């Protein structure tokens, strides 16, 4: 069995913690709880390359308070160290979170260039409030796997985490 560090990055309230709870515990909680710093969970995942113990780092949300604020904090740089994989999370009801995810992706590529990455656009269950056009995702990051997910229903959550676990286990 191998162990791999997986970091979730995205805007505040994009659903990172809810996605982790759905993946780790198989549950959804409608109460919103802001992650301060980082919350770490583990889960054993079977891949075609064998068992992978995922150490899942749910990192606090990133959002500039205003135009002059930094999106990435020094604390986030510390959390990303040693990451084998990155789940970028955006909120399908707030298209501006895709821009946050794009900036975080560029930053992560610079700071963890060997880490595999996947984009999750969350909250697909909120169909009346959905604001991200599918065409926007096709040009968002060519070559980056993208999943439309719902932490509420579980749609594509296991699939996205498992795909990334497989990519991380194949990397040396």
Image (cartoon, rainbow, N blue to C red):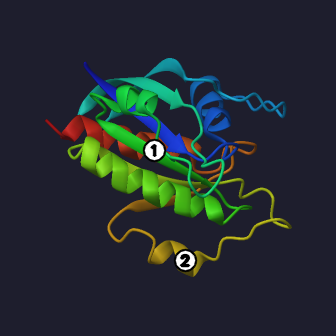
Outermost residue on the left side: it is 172
Outermost residue on the bottom side: it is 135
Q: Residue at horizontal 13%, vertical 35%?
A: 172
Residue for badge 1: 87
Q: In this rendering, would 108 be left or right of 100?
A: left
Q: Residue at horizontal 71%, vertical 58%?
A: 124
Give coordinates of residue 57: x percent, y percent.
47, 26
Assess whether mark 2 and mark 1 are in contact (beta carbons under 8 angstroms).
Answer: no
Badge 1 crowding class, 10 Å Cα cut-off, few under 14, some 14 to 19, many 20 or more, is many
- Frontmost residue, 76 versus 21: 76
Give coordinates of residue 169: x percent, y percent.
25, 35
Q: Quadrant of the N terminus?
A: top left
Question: Does 51 sit above or below residue 141?
Answer: above
Residue 136 marker: 2
Q: Secondary structure at mark 2?
A: helix
- Frontmost residue, 160 versus 138: 138
Badge 2 crowding class, 10 Å Cα cut-off, few under 14, some 14 to 19, many 20 or more, is few
- Frontmost residue, 58 versus 110: 110
Tell me where residue 139 sits by quadrant: bottom left
Give coordinates of residue 73: x percent, y percent.
47, 36
Q: In this rendering, would 41 be left or right of 121?
A: left
Q: Secondary structure at mark 1?
A: strand
Q: Residue at horizontal 64%, vertical 28%?
A: 21
Question: Does 128 sit above or below residue 83?
Answer: below
Residue 137 marker: none
């Amino acid at each position: 069995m191998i162990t791999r560090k997986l970091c979730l990055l995205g805007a505040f309230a994009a659903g990172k913690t809810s996605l982790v709870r759905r993946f780790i515990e198989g549950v959804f909680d409608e109460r919103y709880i802001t992650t301060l710093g980082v919350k770490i969970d583990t889960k054993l995942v079977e891949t075609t390359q064998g068992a992978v113990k995922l150490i899942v780092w749910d990192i606090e949300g990133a959002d500039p308070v205003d135009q002059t604020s930094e999106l990435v904090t020094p604390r986030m740089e510390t959390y990303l160290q040693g990451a084998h994989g990155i789940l970028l999370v955006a909120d399908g009801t707030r298209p501006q979170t895709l821009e946050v995810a794009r900036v975080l992706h560029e930053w992560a590529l610079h700071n963890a260039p060997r880490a595999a990455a996947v984009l999750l656009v969350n909250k697909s269950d909120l169909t009346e409030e959905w604001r991200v056009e599918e065409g926007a995702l096709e040009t968002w990051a060519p070559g980056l796997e993208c999943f439309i997910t719902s932490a509420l229903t579980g749609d594509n959550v296991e699939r996205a985490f498992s795909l990334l676990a497989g990519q991380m286990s194949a990397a040396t």
